């Protein structure tokens, strides 16, 4: 490839990366804009923690079965169609959530959202398509940046609109999904050339998420990384799905306070993603940064349990979640480097399915021990699983280094 064609490809990749960032940003804002009000909406119909966590459980269960199929489809028909279907489904799901009327409608809306929830995995595969290995970690940080800025804008918008009407944030999320659909339709080129797509016909096994997970887990070194990612997601989801309830229970926190907490956390994460991550990855490597993030989470969840005043939650959550922002880009890069270009969609589908499975089981577990043991129990359980994830990744890293030394 000559210099001019290489530069042209870089321009296309840079432009596509900006569009993917905008799509992810709108998606995260849509998710987070309803986060400050969702527990309050559910409490119209039920006061139990398990009812609140069921929003996550149902979404994750639907996504668990759908994500591997969508990932495989993206390897065959391209990333763009899957992204378009996903954002259209999100618009329908958010609109239903806004209409509400009963727990059944809320749960059905989350199911629909989960079925079409292939946006993140398809966008991750898209980034892998346009990213050379040497800049893949940097480009995957786009996902973290989208979450960071989405955490700033989403909760703030949710708190503002929620003060007007608790249902309004859901309709705002639906509108953002429609903007995403327009961005994908008019500005997003396809990233996977026809010659790089999988040509073999899909079979019944392709819709079996367990088969897809097992196939990926059997690849050398990938199984251990998927275990680390699963342990981390299990712990993280348990905390996220119950922490708002914990703040309401212990501090009588209001939607505006929750929105401010998430927004400040987003600012801190944005700083990490934009400034620290690109500089620290070359110095320390993905594994070391991921382990650091997990240790930071352990300290954070234990501290949240003990702080006596709500204002103390702000610095604790900001610091611990900032450390967390190292984990996802690092683990995504480590797993992505283990497969070929034609398998990126399948891998991202599997990692999304595993995350969904952990979201489902982690939320159920956290909701159950919150109700049946004590409100702070999910934080202690999370500390244990964060520790297991960090030890597993440390063991993996040492084994890989030893293998490299011995040849």
Image (cartoon, grey):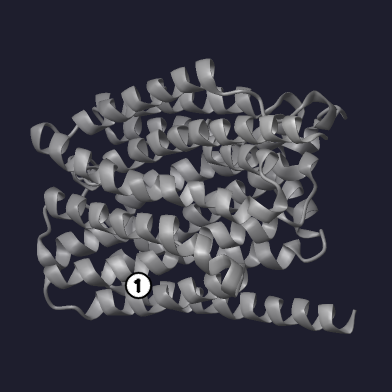
Q: Is residue 191 left or right of residue 233?
A: right
Residue 252 percent location from the top left of the image: 10, 61
Q: In percent of the image, x 46 and y 32: which residue is there?
A: 23
Quadrant where the C terminus is found in the figure: bottom right
- Mark 1 residue element: helix
Q: In percent of the image, x 15 and y 34: which residue is there?
A: 161
- Residue sitting at the far right: 407
Q: In percent of the image, x 71 and y 30: which residue is there?
A: 73
At label 1, counting other C-alpha atoms closer than 10 Å, the crowd grade (few under 14, some 14-19, many 20 or more) is many
Residue 361 percent location from the top left of the image: 49, 57
Q: Is residue 59 left or right of residue 370?
A: right
Is residue 249 placed above or below 60 in the rendered structure?
below
Q: Is residue 372 visible?
A: no
* Closer to the camera in the image, 352 or 5: 5
Q: Which residue is mark 1?
A: 379
* Closer to the camera in the image, 377 or 239: 239
Is residue 397 placed above or below 310 in the rendered structure?
below
* Closer to the camera in the image, 14 or 183: 14
Quadrant where the N terminus is found in the figure: top right
């Amino acid at each position: 490839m000559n210099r001019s064609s290489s530069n042209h490809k870089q321009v296309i990749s840079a432009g596509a990366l900006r569009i993917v960032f905008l799509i992810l940003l709108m998606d995260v804002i849509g998710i987070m804009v309803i986060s400050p009000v969702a527990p309050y909406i559910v409490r119209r119909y039920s006061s139990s923690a398990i009812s609140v966590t069921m929003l996550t459980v149902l979404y994750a269960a639907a996504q668990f079965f759908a994500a591997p199929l969508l990932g495989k489809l993206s390897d065959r028909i391209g990333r763009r169609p899957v992204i378009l279907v996903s954002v259209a489904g999100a618009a329908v799901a958010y609109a239903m959530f806004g209409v509400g009327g009963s727990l059944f409608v809320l749960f059905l809306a989350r199911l629909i959202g989960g079925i079409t929830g292939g946006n993140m995995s398809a966008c991750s595969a898209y980034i892998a398509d346009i990213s050379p290995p040497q800049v893949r970690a940097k480009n995957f940080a786009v996902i973290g940046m989208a979450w960071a800025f989405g955490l700033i804008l989403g909760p703030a918008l949710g708190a503002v609109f929620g003060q007007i009407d608790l249902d309004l944030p859901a309709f705002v999320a639906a509108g953002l999904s429609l903007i995403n659909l327009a961005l994908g339709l008019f500005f997003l080129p396809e990233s996977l050339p026809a010659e790089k797509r999988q040509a073999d016909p899909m079979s019944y096994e392709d819709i079996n998420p367990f088969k897809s997970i097992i196939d990926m887990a059997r690849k050398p070194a990938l199984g251990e990384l998927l275990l680390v990612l699963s342990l981390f997601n299990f712990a993280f989801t348990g905390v996220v799905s119950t922490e708002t309830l914990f703040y309401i229970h212990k501090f009588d926190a209001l939607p505006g306070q929750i929105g401010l907490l998430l927004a400040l956390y987003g600012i801190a994460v944005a700083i990490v993603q934009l400034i620290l991550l690109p500089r620290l990855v070359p110095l320390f490597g993905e594994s070391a940064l991921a382990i650091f993030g997990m240790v930071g989470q352990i300290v954070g969840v234990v501290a949240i349990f003990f702080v006596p005043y709500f204002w103390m939650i702000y610095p604790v959550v900001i610091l611990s979640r900032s450390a967390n922002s190292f984990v996802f880009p690092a683990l995504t890069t480590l797993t992505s480097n283990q497969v070929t270009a034609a398998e990126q969609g399948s891998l991202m589908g599997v990692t999304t399915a595993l995350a969904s499975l952990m979201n489902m089981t982690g939320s159920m577990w956290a909701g159950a021990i919150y109700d049946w043991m004590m409100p702070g129990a999910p934080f202690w359980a999370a500390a244990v699983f964060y520790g297991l994830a960090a030890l597993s990744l440390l063991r993996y890293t040492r084994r890989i280094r030893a293998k490299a030394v011995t040849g």
